[in-house]
Amino acid sequence: MLSLTWKGYYKYTIENVEQYAPDKPGVYKIAILQKGGRLKVRYVGQTDNLKRRLKEHLDFDREENECLRERLKKYSASFAFAAVARQGDRDGAERALYLHYEPVCNDEDSIPS
């Protein structure tokens, strides 16, 4: 069993990604602030470089995921991450996060099986 050590939730800004996200592999979740102050995870992912990938999502001219791009433009968002070195562990963690949160902006076909 893999145990994740989460960092965040931080307000999802370039400045906070620069300050808090490491240049390390890991998994991450992006949540949107709901009415009443609750966060709801709308996207989960994995990467070999958390800082780079989290910054890429904020580049609205290049972000291909329309669902995520529109939510990030319109609503206040936060991010959290966990460093995970091994690719197999990242695959399993991303799958578990997807099954747990059922994020609307993820494409089920792109989630590792």
Image: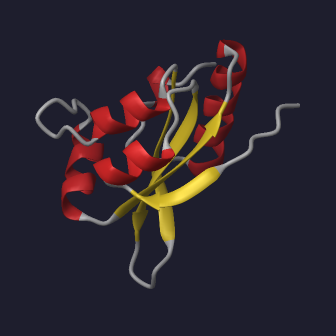
- Left or right placement of residue 8 versus residue 64 in this view: right
Q: Quick check: 47 above or below 35? A: above
Quarter of the image that includes the C terminus: top right
Question: Between residues 18 and 75, which one lies in front from this camera angle?
Answer: 18
Residue 41 visible to the viewer: yes
Quarter of the image that includes the N terminus: top right
- Left or right placement of residue 23 versus residue 75 in this view: right
Furthest residue toward bottom = 36
Residue at 53 percent across and 25 percent down: it is: 111
Question: Between residues 24 and 30, which one lies in front from this camera angle?
Answer: 24
In the rendered image, residue 33, in percent from the top left (x then y), is placed at 40, 69
Q: Quadrant of residue 61?
A: top left
Q: Quadrant of residue 31?
A: bottom left
In the rendered image, residue 45, in percent from the top left (x then y), is placed at 50, 33
The tally of labels here is 0
Q: Quick check: 70 above or below 32? A: above
In the rendered image, residue 92, in percent from the top left (x then y), is placed at 70, 25
Furthest residue toward left = 61
Residue at 56 percent across and 26 percent down: it is: 24
Residue 104 visible to the viewer: no
In the rendered image, residue 34, in percent from the top left (x then y), is placed at 40, 73
Question: Between residues 13 and 96, which one lies in front from this camera angle?
Answer: 13
Residue at 48 percent across and 24 percent down: it is: 49
Furthest residue toward front = 19
Furthest residue toward top = 87
Q: Quick check: 33 above or below 69? A: below
